[in-house]
Image (cartoon, helix red, strand yellow):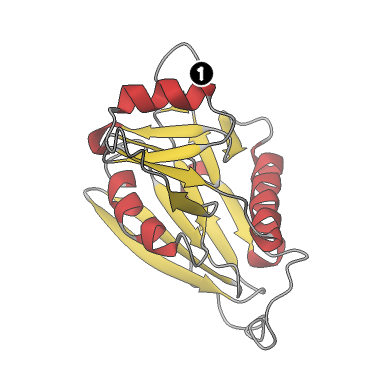
Amino acid sequence: MVAYKKRVSPQLPHITPQEHLERERKAETKSEYYAGVIVAMTGASWEHNLITSNIQGELHSQLRGMPCAVVTSDLRVEVRECHAYFYPDVVAVYGEPEFADAELDTLLNPTLIVEVLSESTEAMDRGKKWTCYQSLKSLQTYVLVSQDRPYVEAYRRQADDWRYSTVEGLGNSLSLEAIGCTLKLADIYDRVEFPQGEAANEADSAPNS
């Protein structure tokens, strides 16, 4: 996800989900909301934006003509069981999207969620946010993408559990069966420059997605 920092009002340290949504629709900047706390989102790095754009572009191309749409972090996702509102980096919906209300700006039924990790967001993306996402009955795949090396993690829904797998190296691919797509890591990380030595595992290892 995009970098963030906590912004808690001293007058109203905890507000209701509806109050947050009303404020968010009037705000000039985006904020996430979890357990009564507002979390202000800040700008993302060049690498983060490249990766997000690459993923969205590849999925959009593969999904053309299919009953599935993909969008980036301008679309809010509501997780009602956690009383939370998040802005995932990439979201795909297979079938008809469902929204919280007539504003059509708050999605209820994502099929795929992708978060691009950063130092400031990784703990949240792996922890509380992932716990919340699991309560979305529509969600079939959750993907975590590293910024500093070609390494992707995926959680796939298996009945009442989740199967975890990883893909590493620019020569490998990530299968997204829930939406009928495949992402090559070389495409995910197109034009991304890694720290020296981090991209060494490019070529010949077998895919483990």
Q: Residue furthest front?
A: 11
Q: Residue furthest right?
A: 191
Which residue does the image show at 61% across and 31% down from the upper left?
66
Identify the element where label 1 is drawn: loop
Amino acid marked by disc 1? Leu
Image coords of residue 64 (percent x, y):
69, 34
* Relative height, residue 126 to residue 5 (above, below): below
* Relative height, residue 196 to residue 22 (above, below): below
Total number of numbered labels?
A: 1
Q: Is residue 108 left or right of residue 160?
A: right
Report whether residue 157 is seen.
Answer: no
Q: Is residue 119 left or right of residue 100?
A: right
In the figure, residue 90 lies in which quadrant? top right
Which residue does the image show at 30% across and 37% down from the upper left?
137
* Relative height, residue 58 to residue 80 (above, below): below
* Relative height, residue 108 to residue 186 (above, below): above
Seen from the viewer's position, the closer of residues 49 and 60 is 49
Report whether residue 161 is seen.
Answer: yes
Seen from the viewer's position, the closer of residues 113 and 100 is 100
Which residue does the image show at 53% across and 55% down from the upper left?
3
Seen from the viewer's position, the closer of residues 182 and 52 is 52
Image coords of residue 31 (percent x, y):
47, 38
The residue beneath circle 1 is 104
Image coords of residue 63 (percent x, y):
64, 38
Q: Is residue 195 left or right of residue 145?
A: right
